[in-house]
């Protein structure tokens, strides 16, 4: 189901929910995605200054993708 993301907090919440559904700890996810556990925690807490490349790496590891489209499409 698509989710509308309008803040870093929205992205973090979605990532955290998916991680939990998948039965992973933050450390498990970090190891799988090649990032640090601290990064995963910051992403999930909605830190607005996380690196986009790493955030996309984590989303890919969760089987998620970020899609940009024009409003109203």
Image (tube, rainbow, N blue to C red):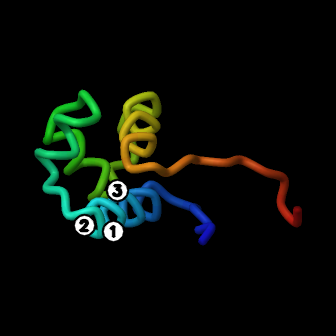
Q: At 62% from the left edge and 67% from the top edge, which residue is drawn?
A: 2
Report which residue position mark 3 lands on.
46
Vertical position of residue 39 compared to residue 20: above or below: above
| Mark found first going from the N terminus, 2 or 3 | 2
Give the CA separation, mark 2 to mark 1: 5 Å
Question: Which circle marks residue 17 in the picture?
Answer: 1
| Mark found first going from the N terminus, 1 or 3 | 1
Q: Quadrant of the C terminus?
A: bottom right
Q: Is mark 2 in CB contact (under 8 Å) with mark 3?
A: no
Left or right: residue 72 versus residue 43 is right
Residue 32: x and y, percent? 23, 36
Q: Nearer the viewer, mark 2 or mark 3?
A: 2
- Looking at this view, is 8 or 19 the one in front? 19
Give the CA separation, mark 1 to mark 3: 13 Å
Residue 45: x and y, percent? 27, 58
Q: Quadrant of the N terminus?
A: bottom right
Q: Determine crowd level at label 2: few under 14, some 14-19, many 20+ residues with C-alpha closer than 10 A.
A: few
Q: At 28% from the left edge and 34% from the top edge, which residue is drawn?
A: 33
Q: Is mark 1 in CB contact (under 8 Å) with mark 3?
A: no
């Amino acid at each position: 189901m698509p989710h509308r993301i309008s803040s870093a907090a929205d992205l973090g919440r979605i990532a955290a929910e998916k991680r939990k559904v998948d039965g992973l700890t933050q450390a498990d996810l970090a190891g799988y995605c090649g990032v640090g556990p601290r990064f995963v925690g910051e992403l999930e807490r909605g830190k607005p200054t996380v690196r986009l490349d790493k955030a996309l790496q984590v989303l890919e590891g969760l089987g998620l993708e970020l899609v940009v489209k024009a409003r109203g499409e």
